């Protein structure tokens, strides 16, 4: 009768082998995490652009009813006029940027903070100007994320506060004029903006070419003086 072979003994991992495995896992995580962040950031940027487009469509519909005047005045906020009885925008949540960290207790109504701001130069003396006064709608920014002056991405939004409500870059007077330290994504080098011809564009925050914070005409940005000013001289 043939003898059976001895059963192989299960061998546990040595400490060195475990360390090697953990090191490999750590390396793989370090490689995949930036990819995850990139995908997540792209998704947020896409949603952000979608929100701006919807705000643009709602604003255009409102202006069609108001002889071309922008929403908002010295007494009424632009967001409340757009969302009034859900006539121009169906939900308040459209005013919330995906880059804006939100509380789970928010109600999603007029008491909820707004992420986007309007270029306050669409008002002259507290009265909304008509769109036909804009010299170059393709370069004039109307709406964009309204950030606070912090080192990381954060927002200066308030609820349905006194008009004209939240302003782009949380500026005090002439936009951009605020102290935001960068854009909303791509390591704060990029930001989305809605223009007066209602196209949405991802812009460089700053630089020699067309940039969100440029306010003067340069060789690389000849329309910089009209990015925040509807016409010259203004007002």
Image (cartoon, rainbow, N blue to C red):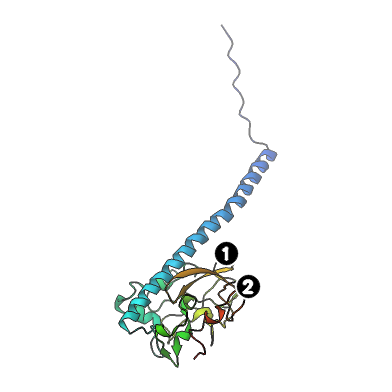
Relative to 85, residue 123 above or below: below
Q: Position of residue 112 (x, y in %)?
A: 42, 76
The disc label shown at residue 208, or none: 2
Q: Position of residue 124 (x, y in %)?
A: 45, 90
Q: At x 58% / y 54%, what residue is drawn?
A: 33
What crowding class fits label 1: few (fewer than 14 Cα within 10 Å), some (14-19), or many (20 or more)?
A: some
Q: Label 1 to label 2, Cα distance in Å?
A: 18 Å
The residue nearer to you, when weighing 150 against 104, is: 150
Location of residue 6 (image quadrant): top right
**Is residue 147 visible to us here?**
yes
Name the quadrant containing residue 72.
bottom left
Residue 84: percent from the left, percent from the top?
A: 32, 79
Question: In the picture shown, does residue 34 fall above or below 97?
Answer: above
Residue farthest to the bottom, as pictured? 125
**Residue under label 1:** 186
- Mark before the other along the chain sequence, 1 or 2: 1
For image coordinates 58% across by 51% down, the residue present is 32
Q: Quadrant of the N terminus?
A: top right
The residue carrying pointer 2 sits among few (fewer than 14), some (14 to 19) or many (20 or more) residues within 10 Å by Cα, namely few
Number of numbered discs visible in the structure rendering: 2
Q: For the residues carrying marks 1 and 2, which lies nearer the camera in this image?
A: 2
Q: Is residue 101 visible?
A: no
Relative depth, front residue between 185 and 67: 67
Q: Residue reaching furthest right? A: 16
The furthest residue to the top: 1
Q: Is residue 58 above or below residue 11?
A: below
Could you say where residue 225 lies in the image, as x and y percent from the top left? 55, 82
Q: Is label 1 in a helix, a strand or a loop?
A: loop
Asked whether disc 1 touches disc 2, contact meaning CB atoms under 8 Å apart, the reply is: no
User: Mark on residue 150?
Assistant: none
């Amino acid at each position: 009768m043939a003898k059976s072979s001895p059963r192989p003994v299960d061998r546990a991992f040595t400490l060195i082998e475990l360390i090697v495995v953990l090191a490999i896992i750590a390396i793989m995580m370090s490689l995949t995490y930036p990819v995850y962040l990139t995908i997540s950031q792209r998704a947020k940027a896409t949603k952000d652009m979608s929100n701006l487009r919807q705000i643009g469509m709602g604003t255009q519909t409102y202006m069609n009813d108001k002889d071309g005047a922008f929403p908002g005045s010295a007494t009424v906020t632009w967001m409340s006029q757009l969302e009034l009885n859900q006539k121009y925008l169906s939900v308040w949540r459209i005013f919330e940027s995906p880059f804006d960290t939100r509380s789970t207790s928010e109600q999603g109504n007029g008491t909820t903070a707004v992420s986007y701001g309007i270029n306050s130069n669409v008002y002259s003396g507290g009265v909304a100007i008509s769109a036909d006064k804009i010299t170059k709608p393709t370069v004039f920014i109307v709406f964009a994320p309204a950030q606070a002056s912090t080192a990381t991405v954060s927002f200066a939004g308030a609820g349905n506060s006194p008009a004209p409500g939240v302003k782009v870059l949380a500026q005090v007077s002439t936009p951009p004029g605020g102290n935001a330290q960068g854009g909303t994504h791509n390591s704060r080098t990029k930001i989305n903006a809605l223009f007066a011809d209602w196209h949405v564009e991802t812009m460089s925050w700053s630089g020699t070419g067309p940039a969100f914070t440029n306010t003067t005409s340069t060789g690389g940005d000849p329309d910089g003086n009209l990015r925040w000013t509807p016409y010259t001289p203004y007002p």
